[in-house]
Amino acid sequence: MGEPIKVEAEVIEPVNLAKAPEPVITYTLPAVKVGNMKEIDGFVANVERFFSSVEIDPDDKKQVKELADVASDVKKAADGINSKRIAMGKEIKAATAESTDALNGLRDRLMAVYDDMRAKVGEAEERQRQARISLLEQEYEAVAPDLMELIPLDSFIKKESKLVSRDKRFTGNKACDLLDDLIADAVHDRARLREGDIEFSTEADMVYCKTLDLRKALDENDRLKREKAEREKHKQAATKLEAAVGRAHDAVSVPTSSEPVPTPEPAKKGPEKPSDPPKRYLFRLEFEADDADCAKVRDFMRTLPGLQGKLFKKVQEVAS
């Protein structure tokens, strides 16, 4: 047999997070000093004293221009001081940049470990939550299966978050017992809504099944009763108004006096003028018929005064 194979494994010591080292930072602060501070301060003081007593004629364009030029020079002096201050700040910040980047990098590495750990914890917590919900659903179906369609399990969980508590002392059996108590309360409350003086019991029950709050269910019934009363009041007022408008209309349309309304007399006409005799015309009537029908037409036409003694004759025979 050959030599036994040696397996070496690296032993990773557990990390004592209670003894996390704090960065020991040594600051070498720059000694910033303005060498000619008194000279600059004296310059600024002279500018302040001089311009505090300067007055110009605002209507003199030359004086206004000269003052504007001098003001520009003062602004340039102020900008020069400010630019030195900005440059100083950049140099100080650059001196700390390397240490700042290093500490940020270490912080980010630890935060990456933290995020990974929290993701695993969150996944485990969700698995535990779903297992508890599954257990509660089985209990709910065994105790009150008909109620599940009206009140979802989530309504009980929202009312009592302890049902899905991760506390090890609150076991699954305790959660089921608490759910049984909540179901019994719900059955009792819904019976009160049906049996009490609840006008809108269905609507109130709908609110209760969503909230498991009897007070909110009763408030919903009161709200609907107020709306109904307001509708009835509005309907009565509208009916009253329509009746009043109708009476006013009738008062305008029908005379109030009981005396008969006099019929206006027709305007008297003057003496009628003699009308001209009606004009007369010559008509010819031509039709086809047998002898019997022709005789009927002839006899009828002879009854007309204007056709008496007139000629009525057969013209020709036609093919049938």
Image: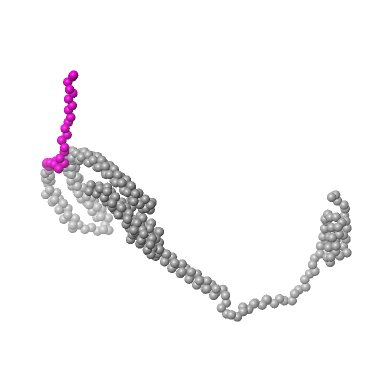
Q: Give the tally of numbered discs.
A: 0
**Can you give x and y, in whole percent of width and height, for residue 116 in the image?**
24, 40
Q: Is 25 included in the stretch rendered in magenta?
A: yes
* In the displayed structure image, the side of residue 283 where residue 199 appears, left or right: left
Q: Quadrant of the N terminus?
A: top left
Q: Residue at position x 46%, y 67% from top?
A: 235
Q: Depth check: give the residue in front, 153 or 86.
A: 153
Q: Residue at x 34, y 56 (%)?
A: 186
Out of 40 and 219, give the one closest to the viewer.
Answer: 219
Q: Is residue 48 magenta?
A: no
Choose top left, top right, bottom left or bottom right for residue 120: top left
Q: At 42% across and 64% down in the image, what residue appears? A: 228
Horizontal placement of 10 versus 125: left or right?
Answer: left
Nearer the observer, 70 or 147: 147
Residue at (56%, 78%) from the top-left corner?
Answer: 256
What percent of the width, then of the height, locates residue 237? Answer: 46, 69
In the image, residue 7 above or below residue 237: above
Would residue 280 be seen by someone viewing this image from the given angle?
yes
User: Can you see residue 126?
Assistant: no
The foreground one among 176 and 302 is: 176
Residue 118's spot in the image, x, y percent? 24, 42
Q: Residue furthest top?
A: 1
Main SS category, magenta section: loop
Color scheme of the displayed model: one colour
Q: Position of residue 84 (x, y in %)?
A: 18, 45
Question: Is 276 drawn above or below residue 160 in the view shown?
Answer: below
Q: Which residues are magenta?
A: 1-28
Q: Residue furthest front?
A: 142
